[in-house]
Structure formats: C-alpha cells, structure tokens
Amino acid sequence: MAKHKTPLLDQLETGPWPSFVTDIKREAESRAKNEKGVEYQIPQDVCEDILGLLELSFKHGRTHWKHGGIVGVFGYGGGVIGRYCDQPEMFKGVAHFHTLRVNQPAGKFYKTEFLKQLCDLWDMRGSGITNMHGSTGDIILLGTTTPQLEEIFYELTHKYNQDLGGSGSNLRTPSDCIGQARCEYACYDTQALCHDLTNSYQDELHRPAFPYKFKFKLDGCPNCCVASIARADMSFIGTWRDDIGIDQEAVKAYVGGEIQPNAGAHAGRDWGPFDIKKEVINLCPTECMKYKDGKLFINNKECTRCMHCINVMPRALRIGNDRGLSILVGAKAPILDGAQMGSLLVPFIKAEEPYDEIKEVIEKIWDWWMEEGKNRERLGELIKRQGFQKLLEATEIKPMPQHVQEPRSNPYIFWKEEEVEGGFKRDVNEFRKHHQR
Amino acid sequence: MAFISSGYDPKQPMKDRITDIGPRHFEEFYPPVIKKNKGKWLYHEILEPGVLVHVSETGDKVFTVRAGGARLMSVSHIREICDIADKHCGGHVRFTTRNNIEFMVDSKDKVEPLKKDLLSRKQSGGCYKFPVGGTGAGITNIVHTQGWLHCHTPATDASGPVKAAMDVLFEDFTSMRLPAHLRVSLACCLNMCGAVHCSDIAILGYHRKPPMLDHEYLDKMCEIPLAIAACPTAAIKPAKVDLPDGRKVNSVAVNNSRCMFCGNCYTMCPAMPLQDDVGDGIVLMVGGKVSNRISAPKFSKVVVAFIPNEPPRWPKTTEAIKQIVEAYAKDARKYERLGEWAERIGWERFFDKCELEFTHHLIDDFRDPAYFTWRQTTNFKF
Ligand code: HEM
Ligand code: HEM
Ligand code: SF4
Ligand code: SF4
Ligand code: SF4
Ligand code: SF4
C-alpha cells in the first residue's frame, strides 16, 4: 500500500517510453520489503516521500524544494548540492535530500562490478535514486542527509577509488564524446585528454576560486556529439590539416548502390537511389568537390572540414592524418546576457601527452578571467565586455583571419597610444602657430 | 536504523583522508574489443534502428545495441542493466551523452538474443524498460534537467514532460524516417542546465511573473546588494518598506515592466520567489544545431512563446512538437536539419507549414541581438 496517493503521477505509467514513476515505485517497494536486510542510513520510505512531494508539485504547478542550503564534504567547495524540501512535516523522508555529483569515467564506459558497488552504496546511504547521468556528465546520486555526506565520500575514495565531481564557481566536471574508443571520425583521444585535464585540475574542480562556473567539453570531430561548441567555456573539437583520404573503389560502391549512404542512417524511408552529385557534391558548403569519370576529387585546400561528405560515405572517405584539435571559447546558456556560441581561438593544436601546449592556453585564460572577470561573469561575457583583442593579448595568440566570420564593418577602431607614431601627447600651442582660433 | 560508520572519524576528519584522486581510469572499463581496437575503427553502419556495427582495421567488429533510458534511474533499474550486461556483454556497459544505455557485443549472433532480452522487459504499467532505438535520422533520448523532482528554480517539471514527449515521439525513436538527426532537449528554467539553446527542438520552462517580495524576511535572508546586482535588466532597487505591524524594514522594490522573469534575483535571494501555477509554463524553441555539418552551428529560436503547464502529460506541448516534427518530415530535404529547412523555406513558411501562430512575443526585443533578427531586406515572402 503506497504511503501517498499519486493519481497524477500514475498517469505517467503507461505509454511505450520507460516510466520514471514506475521505476521509483519499484524502488519504494524494494526498500519497504528490504529482502537483503540493508541497514538503511536514511529513511526507508524516502522513495514514497519523493513521489508524494512530486505529486504535490504536479498538483500545485510549482516546485517544493527550498532554495539553497550549503553543505559539502570537508575541504571541497564543490561536488555536493544541498537540498531541503519546503514541506518537511508532510514528507519527512525528503526533508534533507542532498545531491552528490560523482565524477564519471571518461566516455562513460563501465564495468558492472563498479556500478553495482555504487548501487550498494546508494541503497544503504542514499535514496536509491540516481541520474545516469546529469547534464554536465557526472553520475548524480540524488538524495541523502547531511550526516551521510562524509561517510559516502569516505567510502567512495577508500573503497572505490573514486572522487566527486564539481559544482559551484569552479571547473565543472569535464566530459567528452566516445571518440577513438568507438568512432572512426575521432581526430584525437577525447578520453585521454578528458581524463588528463580532470586530474590535472582537481584543485580547480573542487575548490571554487573562479568568478563563476567553467566548463571543458571535448568532441572528437566537428559533428560535436557532446555539443561542446554550444555549452563549454572551452571546447576542444578534433580536426585535421591535411587531406581527406579517398578510397575510390568504395566511392564506386556507394554510387553503385552496394553500400548504403550515411551508414544507413536514412534506412527508414525510401529516398530513391543514392545520387552522389545531389547528396554530396552539391551539398558541400565550399563547393570544393568534383565527381568526374567515376572518380571523386576534393580540393582539400578549400575544404572547411564540415564532415558532411565523410558522414555520407564513411567507408570511402576518411579524416586526414595530420590530426589535432581546435579550441573554441566562451559558449554559454542565456543567463545573464544572452546565449553565446563558442568562438574560435586556436585553429589547430596537437593533442599529444602531456598536453603542455593546450594547458598553456587554458592557464593563460584562467589568469586573465580570474583577474578581470566580475562575480558571476562567464568567460564568454568577459570576452564580449573587453573584446576579443584582449583575449588574444592574454593568450599571446596572433590575430588571423580564422578568428573572424568577417572583418569589422564599423571603422570605430580603438587605436592604442603606443600604436600611433609619436603617441597621443601633443602641444596645442605649437598647433596654434599654424591654425588660428 | 543504527548509524553505520564507513570508517570516517568526524573527530579527525583529516585522518587517512584521500582527496583529489579524480575518476576511475576509463581504460579499466573498456570492453576488451574496444580496448584492442581503439583508434583503429574503419567505418560503422546502422544495421537497424538502435543497432550499430563498428568495423576495425584488425577485422574485429563491435555490435552496439542502444536502449533508451529515463535518466532518472533507481538502483534496482541499474542493477537490472548490470544483469543484462553480465549476461550478454561480459559485464560491460556504457551510457551516452543523451542518457541512452549502450550494450556492446563482439559478434553478430549475440545481437538478436540481446535485443530480444531488452525488448521483453516491461514495467508493471506496460512501458518498455529498455526500448531499442535512438540512432541515425530519427529522434534520440531527450536530454533534460531536474525539474520539480529536485530543483528550486524550475518553471516546469523535467521528467514528466520528457516522458510525455517521448511517448508521443516514440515511433521516431525506433525508426529513421526523418530527413536528418533531430535532437530534442528540455531545460526547466532559463539557467538551461539542459542546454537547450542549440537543439533542433527545445522545451524550455519559463516564468511569467516578477518575483514576490517577502519583505519581512528579505533583509534577514539575503544580501540586498547581491540581489540588486544580480538583475540583468536593473529592475531592482533598494527600498524601505512599512510592514503592517508598523515596523520599517530594509527591502527591495522591483520595476515590474523591466523584469524578464529570469529568476536571477531568486538565485541570489531566496526571499524573492517567482514560481506560480498559472504564470509558469513552456516556451518552444526550434532550429538549433551544434554540428558543423554543411551549415554552421545555430541557436534555437522561439516559435511558441507560451504553453501552460499541463501536468501530468502536457498535451498542448507534445502536440505542438508533433506538428513541427511532422511538417519537417514531410517537407525537408534529405540531410537537412530542422533549422536549415526553416531557413531555406523562410520562417514565414515555417509558421504556415507547422500551423503555428506568429505573435509579437516572437520578435526579439532584448538588447543588441534583437536588431540582427529584424528583417533588413525586401526579400520576404507573402
Ligand atoms: C543562476 C544560475 C544557476 C543556478 C542557481 C543553478 C542551480 C543549479 C542547481 C541547484 C542544480 C542542481 C540541480 C540538482 O541536481 O538538483 C543545477 C544543476 C545543473 N546546472 Fe545549474 N544553475 C544555474 C545556472 C546554470 C547554467 C547557466 C547552466 C548551464 C547551462 C547550468 C547547468 C547545470 C547543469 C548541467 C546541471 C546539472 C543538471 C543535471 O543534473 O542534469 N546551471 N544547477
Ligand atoms: C559512432 C559514433 C557516432 C557517429 C559516427 C556519430 C555521427 C554523428 C553525425 C554524423 C552527426 C551530425 C549530424 C548532422 O548534423 O547531420 C552527429 C551528431 C550528433 N551526435 Fe553523433 N555520432 C556518434 C556517436 C554519438 C553518440 C554516442 C551520441 C550520444 C548519444 C551522439 C550524439 C550526437 C548528437 C547529440 C548530435 C547532434 C549534434 C547537433 O545537434 O548538431 N553521437 N553524430
Ligand atoms: S563528435 Fe565526432 S568523434 Fe565524437 S562521437 Fe561524434 S562523430 Fe564521433
Ligand atoms: S568535409 Fe565538407 S567542406 Fe570538406 S569536402 Fe566534405 S562536404 Fe566539402
Ligand atoms: S534548468 Fe533551472 S530549474 Fe532546471 S535543473 Fe537547471 S537550474 Fe534547476
Ligand atoms: S527575475 Fe530577473 S529580470 Fe526579474 S527582477 Fe529578478 S533578476 Fe531582474
């Protein structure tokens, strides 16, 4: 017998898509029965109460979580998000319901052994409810009480060799696409760089010292499967500098219809026979491709590596061999000053261990942002406020046409005194000798 | 409920303390076929919706079956995922950025039994536990945020509307009939933890009423200068307020006509709540993308300025989404993303074809960016 009636939530228990309501109810039942004899460290009926509270929100059309509540583990400023309910008498089980962000392994591959350990931990010391995964990338353990926080951290670090992620005004847990682990488009090892940056910057991850949050996201190619270009203060996007590899035999096989275009991504509908002119040559945004006498030619110098032709014919075309990544900076969601897309800062940089060159760019940017950034000002907003030139100065990167979509259309150029011959100081009396008042 | 210590001693918090060790190393978790062939993948194919094969230059193959997940997962559900991975995949499993679950096997004969197993598992109400799909020119799992289940600022729920939307879009999760990938995301407030500002279709929770002012507590709960500084439109100023009992307190006043309901003040000051049952609801945005394929990444644009929250199933929201998806499926060219289609046919046609009403709320009036979105040409369509 359920503790709270949930007529509204119950309506989410049908339809084909997995129902979180059914899932939480199942967990509630499992905790009530407690067949394994777990010594629950937070209220056993926490899952009933979370459902009851959510039902109340469905009824009121409003959240029932209080704002704020600073909790954490000793020595860390990030990794735990405090949460208190605004109806604690009605729902005692979720009066405190803090969240832990657990740093996910790069690429989100798991051995079940590890996942089961986390489940045991969260069964006993938490609500048994998780997010796999939170939007930032972490494993999110939803809902525990203050006295359990240190215990959970202790178990994580001592038993499972595993650390918390970031929250607050610090480096957020970096996350990456599957990359070379299973994608032929990956121009560098996203997991290796993600792991290296995560470990190199543990201090920045756990002890907030920044004006606001800072995100690294890593995509192996311009397809941007983790949306790095849109949601990271620094996006690392794989690319190459030489030529796209062509296997002319495979091109023939695509043209002849023996291989499905786009790896079969369009198989759900009859789009007619593959037409290389229409689907590849004419869609190439730089018009740098040609198909003649049964052969495909690419004028690689003009190619902007948009990935379209490679996506359409993955068996015939291959990313180049001189591989590295581009760094874009300043993407963010609308708060406060409107959404920003990442802007290209470093067109190409090699991604080889120990990644010193990349870290040099990161650290110069942090120095500048920590010096100049206002409280709660994201990097993108600082760049907008002070100008891209300031970013170039801070990073000691030479301006180049790749930095702009087009040159400026207003001629209101801020020349600096040292850039103008003889400086700004002049003698007005000397001037007046030749120009009457 | 006896307290069980993990070994941690609160009297000596630094004793044996281990910190800053970072996450487990990814290589520990790679399935053997991945470890062996990493960086050597030659090509991939989508064999059927939800099933991928990647072929290595060594000749090895890895078959991936992708199953949808509700992101919000209980440990019982995760244990079931583990059981499946133990049974079919040598104890390995992975999650995708969009909260799908990927089961990988190293030979083709293992695919069918795996798929069958996944699809045979149903929840008590009849929902699939592990629907297979989410590949290619279709709709994959909706990335989303916390909503009423766990956040203090939402203007809508997250898991609820996502469940409702995925039920409506389910056929496009299990098939690949669309002109290109179509990504749907949900964020329950403007903070956009769910990063919807660049998705093909974005469901965004939005407040429409300025903050309430809890004058009696405001000065006690908040740093007034921080609340004032938080407002992007400078709508807040300090004020002395007379309480009904005659006391005079320090508080703030909000210029309502300047408020764009972003909730930043509430973030800094809990005594300025703004959530409301009829004020809050959903904004629909479309046409964003992040891939650099063919055209540059784009922001999503607002096409429906407000839909009321309709728990538990948000029918108006899901209906509008369905309308947009169907119009796009019918009209766009192969490889054309939703935003590319809208730009090609023009936004005036987009509103016709999707049968959406254009209102004054859809014309930008926020600072500089607004100007760049007004039309500065006579090349329009009637
Ligand atoms: C005033 C600003 C913000 C506040 C007060 C805020 C607050 C929060 C809170 C309380 C959570 C935890 C939710 C939970 O786990 O219960 C959260 C999660 C998150 N926030 Fe924010 N946030 C803010 C801005 C942003 C922005 C601008 C972004 C980026 C777009 C963002 C991205 C995220 C992400 C990715 C998560 C994780 C959500 C998840 O688990 O899926 N936040 N935020
Ligand atoms: C074998 C590995 C993968 C390949 C070859 C691949 C390929 C692609 C391609 C070709 C695109 C561009 C689509 C377009 O704009 O037309 C794309 C976009 C995308 N991929 Fe992947 N992908 C892979 C893995 C993944 C995974 C595992 C995920 C997460 C579940 C993912 C998520 C996305 C997302 C969200 C986009 C959309 C980006 C946007 O909004 O523009 N991809 N991928
Ligand atoms: S971003 Fe590129 S390399 Fe990474 S998974 Fe997507 S297609 Fe592959
Ligand atoms: S990657 Fe894009 S720009 Fe380059 S040749 Fe292919 S389609 Fe053209
Ligand atoms: S989007 Fe807003 S309401 Fe939703 S989880 Fe993030 S901060 Fe909370
Ligand atoms: S909701 Fe936003 S715009 Fe409105 S008063 Fe608060 S901070 Fe200012």
Image (cartoon, rainbow, N blue to C red):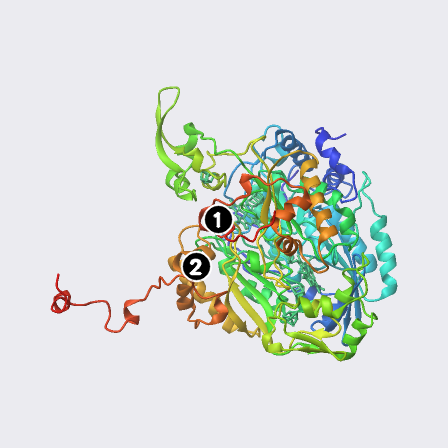
Q: What amino acid is labelled 1 in the image?
A: Ala
Label 2: chain letter: A
Question: Under tag 1, what secondary structure?
Answer: helix
Q: Position of residue B306 (x, y in %)?
A: 59, 37
Viewer-proximal residue among A83 and B251: B251
Quadrant the N terminus of chain A occupies: top right
* Residue B34, position as x, y percentages in the image: 74, 68
Q: Is B342 rendered above or below residue A399?
A: above
**Is residue A9 shown to the viewer in this render?**
yes
Task: Give the numbered dot on residue A193.
Answer: none
**Residue A183 in sight in this render:** no
Residue beneath the point at 69% across and 73% down: B39
| Mark 1 neighbour class, 10 Å CA radius: few under 14, some 14 to 19, many 20 or more | few
Q: Nearer the viewer, residue B310 or A47?
A: B310
Q: Is mark 1 within 8 Å of ligand 6?
A: no
Residue at which label 1 appears:
B370
Q: Position of residue A285 (x, y in %)?
A: 62, 67
- Identify whether B297 is placed above or below B225: below
Reading the image, the residue beneath label 2 is: A383
> Is residue B15 placed above or below B207 in the rendered structure?
below
- For image coordinates 67% across by 66% down, the residue present is A283
- Horizontal side of B166 relative to B277 (left or right) equals right
Q: Is residue A70 left or right of residue B229?
A: right
Quadrant occupied by the C terminus of chain A: bottom left
Label 2 neighbour load within 10 Å: few <14, some 14-19, many 20+: many
Tell which tag, 2 or 1, sits nearer the viewer.
Answer: 1
